[in-house]
Amino acid sequence: MNSRNRRTLTGLLVAAVAAVATWYAASGGDGTTTTSPQPTPTVTVSPTSDATDVVPTSGVDPDSGLAWIAESDLPPEALDTLKDIDNGGPYAYPGRDDTMFTNREGLLPDHGRGYYREYTVDTPGSDDRGARRIIRGDGGEFYYTDDHYDSFRRIAR
C-alpha cells in the first residue's frame, strides 16, 4: 500500500471513529439512545478527493514527524520554486535542481535511493545558491528547509 493510499485509509478510519464516538456520546455511553437522536456525521469521499485534500495549518505530519508549514507561509521565492516544479522547469540552477536528494541527514522519512529530488529556493542577497531548498518525494510530498538540511518542515499543499 503506497503512502497516499495509507493516508486516505487513515483519514477514513479517523472519520469512522469520530462518527462512532458521536453516536456513543449521544447514547449516554451505554449504546442505547436516551435523548433525542443526534444527526450522525457522514463522510463522503468522491473519486476526485481523499483525506489528503484537507490542508493542515499546524501540528505535526504523522508520516514524517515534521511540523507543517502552510504554502502561504513560505517565502515568495519558495512559491516561485513550487511553480517551477509543478511546470517541470525550467529551473534556476540547471544541473543542480531536479537532482537526486539522498537524505544523508536522515531527517526525512526513509525511502529508497532516488525517491527524493531537490530544488533551490533563491535567497535574495546571497552570492550563491543559498541555504533554502524544497525537497519533493515521489509520493507527491514536499519539504522545505531554510538552513541547508539542518531541519525540514512538511509543506501543506
Image (spheres, grey):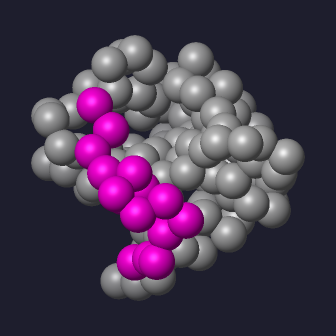
Residue 89 included in the magenta stretch of the image: yes
In front of the other: 33 or 154: 154
Residue 42 or 62: which is nearer the viewer? Answer: 62
Q: Which residues are magenta?
A: 88-102
Percent x, y for residue 134?
Answer: 54, 48
The residue closer to the viewer here, 87 or 53, is 87
The image position of residue 116, as x and y in percent, is 31, 44
Quarter of image, res 152: top right
Residue 69 at x, y = what percent? 71, 43
Q: Seen in the image, is 11 located left or right of residue 47?
A: right
Q: Nearer the viewer, residue 67 or 136?
A: 136
Residue beneath the point at 39% across and 51% down? 96
Res. 139 visible in picture: no
Q: Say above or below: 150 vs 73.
A: above
Q: Does the magenta segment cover residue 18?
A: no
Residue at image location 64% in from the left, 52% down from the top? 121
User: What residue is shown at x 49% (from left), y 69% (from top)?
Assistant: 91
Q: Quadrant of the C terminus?
A: bottom right
Whether residue 128 is visible to the viewer of this picture, yes or no, is: yes
Q: Is residue 86 above or below residue 16?
A: below
Residue drawn at point x = 41 percent, y = 27 percent: 108
Q: Is residue 122 left or right of residue 109?
A: right
Q: Is residue 88 above or below residue 52?
A: below
Q: Main secondary structure of the magenta part?
A: loop
**Residue 154, quarter of the rendered image:** top right
